[in-house]
Amino acid sequence: MATFLYKLGRLSFRRRRYVALIWVALLALAGFGAASASTATSSSFSIPGTEAQRAFDLLEQRFPGGSADGASARVVFKAPGNEKMTDPANKTEVDKVIGELKSGSDQIASVTDPYTAGAVSKNGSTAYVSVSYKVNSMELTDATRDALEDAGHAAQKSGMTVEIGGDALMVIPETGATEIIGVAIAAVVLVITFGSLIAAGLPLLTALIGVGIGVSTITALANVLDLGSTTSTLAMMIGLAVGIDYALFIVSRYRAELAEGREREEAAGRAVGTAGSAVVFAGLTVVIALVGLAVVNIPMLSKMGFAAAGTVAIAVLIALTLVPALMGFAGKRVMGRKARKAAEVPGGAEGKPNMGTRWARFVLRKPVWVLLVGVIGLGTVAVPAASLEMGLPDEGSQPTSTTQRRAYDLLSEGFGPGFNGPLMVVVDTANSSDGKTAAKQVSDEISGMKGVVAVTPAQFNKAGDTAMITVVPKDRPSSVDTENVVHSIRDAGEDIKSDTGAEVLVTGSTAMNIDFSQKMNDALLPYLALVVGLAFLLLMVVFRSVLVPLKAALGFLLSVVAALGAVVAVFQWGWLGSLFGVEQTGPIMSMMPIFMVGVVFGLAMDYEVFLVTRMREAYVHGEKPGQAIVTGFRHGARVVTAAAVIMMAVFAGFIGSSEQMVKMIGFSLAIAVFFDAFVVRMAIVPAVLALLGHRAWSLPRWLDRILPNVDVEGEGLREQLDETPRGDAGGERELTRV
C-alpha cells in the first residue's frame, strides 16, 4: 500500500493543477446539485420492531386522516390574579385564540375547546388548548409556527399568562456559531503547531472543501434517498474533525521529509506513502464505527451513519490527493521561516528534545506509576456510570427562558406533571367478540393502577374495531414512575388479550421515548462488539501484533466509560451543573452513549494509528522498543495533541447551546476526547508498550502467514528506494520540529 500511495502522492504533486481542478469541479457540481434540489423535509421517524411504532402504524391504518404521528402543541392559559379561566372575559379571549389557530394554517388537523374537552384545572386558574397538525414537527412551515406563536398575543394584553408547549415549536438547534468558533480555534492551534500560516491554512481549506462536497451531496440527494434535514449534522461535525486531522498528519510528515533535505516532490510522495497509509486505516476505523450504527435498526440513525461515513471517505481521498497538490502550490513556504532556517543549518533540524521526547522518556522511567495513575484516575471518574439512567429529556429540561418550559411548568402546577406526557392506549378489537366490553375492561384496569391520575373514555373508529384511550400518569414524562406505568399497562394487556382477544398497545411521545431508549440500550453491547471487533482485526493488520490492538481497544473502552461517568455526574447528579448551565437534572439522552461511542471511537483510533505507527515504523527499522516509543512521541505527540485540542474546542463549543441535548453531546464528546487523547494515548499506551517491550510487536507465525502485509510503515517502500534504515546512526536524529 505504501508504494501505491507514494506514487499517488508524487502524481498528485506533479499534476497539481489537474488535481485541484478536479476537486474544485466536484465541489461546484455538488453545490449546484444542492442549490437546484428541492428543499429537504424531515424523513419520517420510525422505530421498527417496537410496540409504540406498531400502535402508530395501526392508528394510521384504522384512523385515516388522524395524523397519529403529527406534531402537537398546547397553548396554556393562566388567569390573572384571583380571576378564573371560566370568567366570561377570559373565556371570550380563549375563544378568539381558538379561532386564530383554526384559520392560521392549513397544516392544522384539529383544535380542541378547553371548556368542552375538560381542559380546565380544578381551581379554574389554568386551561389549555390542544392543537394537532397533519405533519410532523420538522415538516411544519415557518408560517405555521409563526401563527402558533402569535395566537396568544392578544390574550396576553388582557393580562393572562399564555405559554406554548409541545413539539410543534421544536426546531433543529442552530450550530453555525459554534462551528465558526471551532474553526477559529482550530486555526489558532494550527498556526501555533506549524508556525506557518500556509501550513495552518492547508488542513482548514481541505477540510472545508471535503465537508462542502459531502454536505452538498447529502442535500442534493435528500429527497431521492429520503434523508432528513438532520442527516447532514453528524456528517458536518465528523467531516470537519477528521478532515483537519488527516490533512494535519500529511502536512506534518511532509515538513519532516523536507527537514531531512529531500526534494519537494519526493517529500510529498513519502509523506503520502507513510502518513497516508495511516490515514487510510484510520479512516476505515471511522467508517466502520459510523456504518455500524445500522445495527441499531433505526432508519434515521442508519442514514446519518452512512452519510457521515461517505463524508469521511471524501476526507481520506482529499488527504491523499488534494493535500499533496496544494503542498505543491505552497512550495517551501509550508515550512515557516524558523523551520526553513533550521533546515538550512547543518544539524539545525535536530535541536533540543521537544516536549514529546521528554514526556516519553519520563514514562519509560516510571511506566508502572504512569499506568496506575492513568487507570485508577479514569476508573474513579467512571464510577458514576454504574448509575446511568437513559431516557429522552422532556420539555422540563429546557431553559426557563423558553416558552416550552414555562408552559410545562404551568401545566404541572395546574393539572399535575403527568399532563405534560399523556399516554395513548390503542385497543385493537378486531379479534374480540365484544369490542366495547374489552375496551371498558382496559379502561377499568388502567384506572386502578398506581401512578395513573386520569383515564378518558374509549373513542372508537368508524369501523368499530379500534379504540383510543388517553391515560394521564401522575409523574412527569421522563420519570421512572411513568415508565413503570407504561410497563404495567403492557403487562395487563397480555392478560386482557388472553381473556378477550383484544390487543392492547401503548404509544404516544412518552411511550415512544421509552421504547427508543430501550432499543438504544439493547443495541449498545452488540454495537460495541461489532465496532471494536472489526477495528481489532484491522489494527492487527496495521501493527502486525495482537497485544497492541488489544491495548487500543481496552484503552478506548476505559475512556468511554470514564466519559459516561462524567456525564452522569454533571447531567444526572448535578455535580458542577451550574458551571455547565444544567438547570434540571434528569436521565441521560438514550442516543448519546452509542453516538459517543461511534464518534469518539473513530477519533481515538485516529490518534492510536498516527502515534503508534510511527513507533512501529521506528521499531521495524531497527530501534529498540523504548527508543521506538521516544521516536514515535518526538514525531507524533505534538501533532496528535494539536488534533485533540482542535476536536475538544469544536465539541466544547456546543456546551454553550440552550438545548440540553446539544449541551450534553458537546460535553460528552469533549471530555471523551480529552480522556482518550491525553490519558489513554499519551500516558497509558506508552506505559503499556514500555512494560511489554519486544512482546508488544510479536505476532504468532501462523497468524503472520494469514494476515495480509499492507506495509503501513513503508518498509517495502524504503527498501525499494534503497534508503538507509533508521536504526543506524541516523536513527536518533530529530526529523521534524513539529
Image (tube, helix red, strand yellow):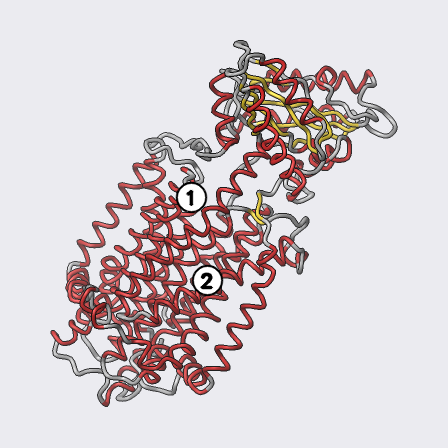
Q: Is residue 576 left or right of residue 183?
A: right
Closer to the chain start, of discs 2 and 1, is: 1
Quarter of the image with the N terminus in it: bottom left
Label 2 – label 1 distance at C-alpha: 19 Å
Residue 172 vs residue 608, the one in the foreground: 608
Which numbered marker is on residue 706? none
Residue 616 vs residue 30, the one in the foreground: 616
Q: Residue at x 42, y 32 (%)?
A: 43
Residue 571 vs residue 444, the one in the foreground: 444
Q: Residue at x 56, y 18 (%)?
A: 109
**Residue 580 image point, x, y percent:** 63, 56
Which numbered marker is on residue 557? 2
Q: Residue furthest top?
A: 462
Q: Is residue 228 above or below residue 204?
A: above
Q: Residue at x 56, y 52 (%)?
A: 664
Q: Residue furthest right?
A: 82
Residue 716 vs residue 190, the one in the foreground: 716
Answer few, some or many: residues within 10 Å of disc 1's Cα (few below 14, many 20 plus, some between 14 and 19).
many
Q: Is residue 63 visible?
A: no
Q: Is residue 360 left or right of residue 488?
A: left
Q: Is residue 15 above or below residue 471?
A: below
**Residue 562 image point, x, y percent:** 53, 63
Q: Which residue is mark 1?
A: 296
Q: Amino acid at mark 2?
A: Leu
Answer few, some or many: residues within 10 Å of disc 2's Cα (few below 14, many 20 plus, some between 14 and 19).
some
Q: Amino acid at mark 1?
A: Val
Q: Is residue 478 left or right of residue 703?
A: right
